[in-house]
Image: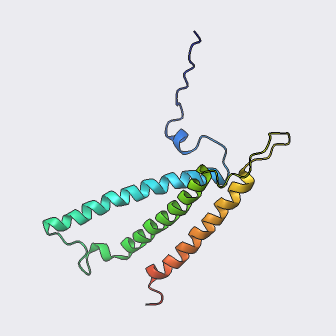
Amino acid sequence: MAEMKRHDNRLGLWGWLGGGRWGVERHAYILHRLTGLAILLYFLMHIVVTSLRASGKYMWIEGHVLHQPVFRFGEYLVFAAFAYHAFNGIRLVLVELGLAVGKPIEPIYPYKTSLNVQRPLLISMMVLAGIFLLLGSFEFLGVGK
């Protein structure tokens, strides 16, 4: 019986973040993971701050710590992470369902890749996320109130 090869993950965290070619897709992959972790961290902090209300500690009273400009900017960063993560997630769902990989072709040299279909989808989703961020920044800056 043939012996199974064992491949240890010697890259550790670097293998989780990188570990491949560095194109636009790799940067989108890393940013998607980091924004997911940031949203999770915000969610956990939100639970803690909201649960303090049960003990009578109101942190969102006018003029208190959570109304400082640094927290307002933090809210915008959470909004930006959400916008990127959501639009990139929609793109990933379309790719996984096979709707954004193009028609299957016979692999004849010179090889054609599905990047010709996926990269424009990535760029268009990031443009939509940018528009979403721009429109959201009007709310955070108080324009139009």
Q: Residue at x 75, y 47 (%)?
A: 113
Q: Which residue lies most toward the right here?
A: 109
Q: Position of residue 101 (x, y in %)?
A: 68, 51
Residue 63 sits above or below residue 73 on the image: below
Q: Nearer the viewer, residue 143 or 98?
A: 98
**What quarter of the picture does the C terminus occupy?**
bottom left
Q: Nearer the viewer, residue 48 or 119?
A: 119
Q: How many marks?
A: 0
Colour theme: rainbow
Q: Position of residue 119 (x, y in %)?
A: 69, 57
Residue 23 sits above or below residue 45 on the image: above
Q: Residue at x 17, y 69 (%)?
A: 57
Q: Residue at x 53, y 78 (%)?
A: 135
Residue 83 sits above or below residue 41 on the image: below
Q: Which residue lies most toward the bottom here?
A: 145
Left or right of 127 on screen, residue 52: left
Q: Residue 126 appears in which quarter of the rendering?
A: bottom right
Q: Which residue lies most toward the top here?
A: 1
Q: Position of residue 66 (x, y in %)?
A: 30, 73
Q: Position of residue 50 (x, y in %)?
A: 24, 66
**What quarter of the picture does the N terminus occupy?**
top right
Q: Residue at x 26, y 80 (%)?
A: 63
Residue 78 sits above or below residue 12 on the image: below
